[in-house]
Every structure is written in structure tokens, then in C-alpha cells.
Amino acid sequence: MATPYIHRTIDAVWRIESARLIASLTRIVHDVGLAEDLAQGALVAALEQWPQSGIPDKPGAWLMTTAKHHAIDQIRRNIRLERKTEELGRDLEIEQKLGVPELDVDSDEDMGDDLLRLIFIACHPVLSKEARVALTLRLLGGLTTDEIARAFLVPEPTIAQRIVRAKRTLSEAHVPFEVPVGNEREARLSSVLEVIYLIFNEGYSATSGDDWMRPALCEDALRLVRILAELVPNEVEVHGLVALMEIQASRLRARVGPSGEAIPLLEQNRGRWDQLLIQRGFAALLRADSVGVALGPYRLQAAIAACHAQARTPEATDWERIAALYDALVQLAPSPIVELNRAVAVSMAFGAAAGLEIVDTLTTEPSLKHYHLLPTVRADLLTKLGRFNEAGEEFKRAAALTRNTRERELLLERAAAVMKG
Amino acid sequence: MRYMMMTKNDPNNPITPPSPEMYAAMDKLIEEMSKAGVLLATGGLGPNPTQVISSGGKIIVTDGPFAEAKEAVVGFALVEAKSKEEAIEFSRRFWQVAGDGAGEIYEVFGG
């Protein structure tokens, strides 16, 4: 086999196996940083040996055996150096665990538990949000630091340092490798969901498409959330997030025009929506229903996304239902942006005046001061109400706020058109 | 990226009906790949296809089975993979369970 080909194959094997490998190793050595080093060591060994020997039948098991051998070597080296007995005791215990010769003994259930623990540790609140995102992509997505850096448009050393620091922080804080229970569980799970959705949105908001790595983040995030849903099948919000992301991803092809411009939801060609992903989204919502009745923010947003997915034409949209869902969402997770979305839904369901009433309460909101969609929405509603001069001023204000050149041109055209009459 | 993996039958080497063990192993593999978030759809295809030919604005429909069909598609799996090599890795896992046989992997382009 040609070397470049085998290197790409090893990359693929790594992507499939690395998370499980690091998860199992972390359970044994009690340190996620060390576990990752051991896993990386096994990868280096594969890169050295597989071009000659070929890909082993069970590449995952091969990597695991190799990593365990490295761990044993390292522990023996440490034991030869004289050290405190307590550390020695712990290392001997680890060596005993490593000594288990049969490598396929980990049941699927154990494996799943380890993977879940790894997800929780990567998204631990002791880390900054940026660190959680980077560590999750690295440990669970199998991405290289270079790939993460390109996806987030930051220099590679920044990401490398972020990951090193994150691993050190986890180690120094003695964060246990466990699945949180009780009161802690909900908060920790919502941190996990937040990280996954952040990754998804980073890819989803990339409309330029100069670099394939950014849209690929949507795929990484989707794969992660699908895995999570199987690991914690009784969590309503996890299925809610699966549904939300599947349905949003169904519009990926339809939301960007030929010259890279963003196409708003109501103007998208619905024939280009991916029906397979929509179906998967609906299935996830049904699963959420079967698991529990609790309404969380992700489930509500998924229900809103489902309303749009269900409508064959924009006119067929059930705006009253969407307005009601936004009502619930704004109570559960109040934010000016959600309130602005609610205003739009209310205007579609009950008329422009009702929508404008809500929008007018937001004009003094400091966090929306530079948000171009606020004057855009306001201008739309004023136009519908026949207040053309005010609408024109709002379109101009929106044009001054947007950073997108094409959008600015469009807004200025609308301002001119509406003021002409 | 999406890849369509298709298994074909080889008339010179007809697929033997799978044993219960192989069925169980295949079920497990399908479950694992679904849980891993990569398998989007999969299924087996019936032995009696209907052939449709469009020619000069006319549609000619012929019911199978077609004895002369050398390499009929007998099953498919639609997977979401990061690369062609990853799709090949999934395929390798499939054939480790399925035994001897042949198939093809196509990248699926979005419309």
C-alpha cells in the first residue's frame, strides 16, 4: 500500500477509535492528559508500523494494547526511580489493571460509561468555554489542533496552548473521571449541550465557505450529539438538541445563495431542504416526547424548527403555534434575541402592530444596540403598517450596522424603495 | 460528506444465506454504527427489480428478475463520514462480519 494512502487510512482509524481509546485509558491512569499522551504514542507507533505490517484486523484493539504497553513501561521506569510509597501504591494498582491481558473484555456498557465520563470531563465548568470547545473537539472529535485552529480562525499555537492548559487545569483541580449525579448532573449536562451547540453554530454561521473545516464542524457536532443521545437516552433535552441540530442542518444547502449570500428562512427553496435530516429531527422529537414531558430550551427551539420544517410553503407556517412556543421559550430562557424572534412570530400570527409593540420595548436594550436585525425587523413592521418614512430611517440604520457588504447594499435599496412610496 | 456503500452479488460466488450468528453480528454492527452517529440509512434490496428505461420521451417498464444481471445491488448503507478513508474503514468492519463478497462506495453529492 502506498504511504500517503495508509496515512489517510490511519487518520480515519484514529478518528473512529481515539475517543474510546482515550476514555478507556483515562479510567485506568486517572489523568486525561496522560491518557491522551499514551493514545498519541500508540498513534505514532501505528504510523511507524502499519505501512509495513498493513492495517491490523482490529485496529482499535491494536492501539489499545500498544498504549497499555507504553503505560506499563512508563510505570516501571517510574518505579525504578525511588518515589513516595503512596504514589508507588497507586501505580502498582494501575499496573494491575493494565495487566489484564484480554483487551476485548470491556463490555459495551463499560465503554459507553467511559465515553460519557470523557464528555463530561472535557466540558467541565472548571474550564473556560473556549477551552471546553477545543478539548471536546480534540478528545471526542479526534481533530488535530491544526484542524481546530482552522475551524475557529485562530493561530494553531493558540489552540495548542489552550488544550495544554485545559488538561493541566483538570489535573490540578483533581477533577474526577465520573458521570455526575444528583443536583450536579443537570448543570453539568447543560454545559455539555452548550459546548456541542456552540461547535455546531460555529460551523452553521460560516457562510463564506472558503474553508471546508468550518461547515465540517456541523458534522462533528451532529455526530457528537447523536452519540450523546445514545449514552444518555433518558434525557429529554439531549433529544431536543439532536432534533434542533438535525433540522437546522437540513437547511444547510438552502441557506446560502450562489454568491455566498445568506438566504433568510422564509425565502429559502424548501425543495433543497434535506428530508432525511428533517425525518431524523422529527424522530428525535418523538423520542423526547417518549422520555418525558419537561420542556427545556432546546426542545422548544426544536419544536419551533419543526413547525418550519413541516410547512410546505412559507404561507403554510403555523405562526400561532410558533408564537406560543416563543412565549414559553422567553419565560424559560429570557433573552433580547429570543424576544425579537417572538416579536416576528407574533407579527406573523396576529399582525404587524402586535409585533411592533414588542419590538419597541427592545429599542433601549443595550445588548441589541449594535444588532442590525433589530432595526431591520422594525423597518419591516413599519412598512407593513404604512409608516414608510420611519421604515426608511430604520433600514438606513440597519445598513449602517451590518458588517456584510451585500446585506448593506440590499438594506439601502430597501430604504430607498420604501421612502419613494 | 456522505457515502453510499453498496453490496453486490456475484453470480459465480452466490452469497450463502447468512447464519443466525452472522445476523446477530450484523445487527450489532448496525446498532454500533447508528450509535456512533454515522449510519444514516441502511437496507437490503429485494431480488425482483423493475427496470425503467426512458427513451425518446417514452418510458419502458420491464419487471424482473433479470437472469442476465451480473452484479445486482443487494444492500446499501448511507453513511456520514469525514473522508473516503473513513467510509472504507466502516466498510472494512462490515466485511469482517459479512465474509466474502464485493461492494462499491460512492460519494454522494448534495443536490
Image (spheres, helix red, strand yellow):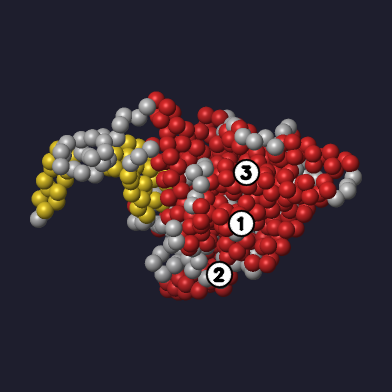
Callout 2 environment at 10 Å: few (<14), some (14 to 19), or many (20+)?
Answer: some
Q: Is residue B46 visible?
A: yes
Q: Pick whichever of labels 2 and 3 is earlier in the sequence.
A: 3
Q: Position of residue A358 (x, y in %)?
A: 58, 52
Q: Amino acid at mark 3?
A: Thr
Res B92 → quadrant? top left
Which residue carries the number 2 mark? A402
Quarter holding the C terminus of chain A? bottom left
- Disc 2 and disc 3 on one polypeptide chain: yes
Residue A64 x/y as whole percent: 62, 44
State the CA–CA distance, disc 3 to disc 1: 14 Å
What residue do we see at 72% from left, 51% from top?
A33
**SS of the residue under disc 1:** helix
Q: Residue at x 20, y 44 (%)?
A: B70
User: Which residue position holds label 1?
Assistant: A44
Which residue matches tag 3? A65
Q: Is residue A406 above or below residue A273?
A: below
Q: Secondary structure at mark 2?
A: loop
> Does label 1 lie on the same chain as label 2?
yes
Q: Disc 3 on helix, strand or loop?
A: helix
Q: Give the percent coordinates (x, y) of residue A189.
A: 66, 41
Chain identifier of the residue bearing label 1 in the image = A
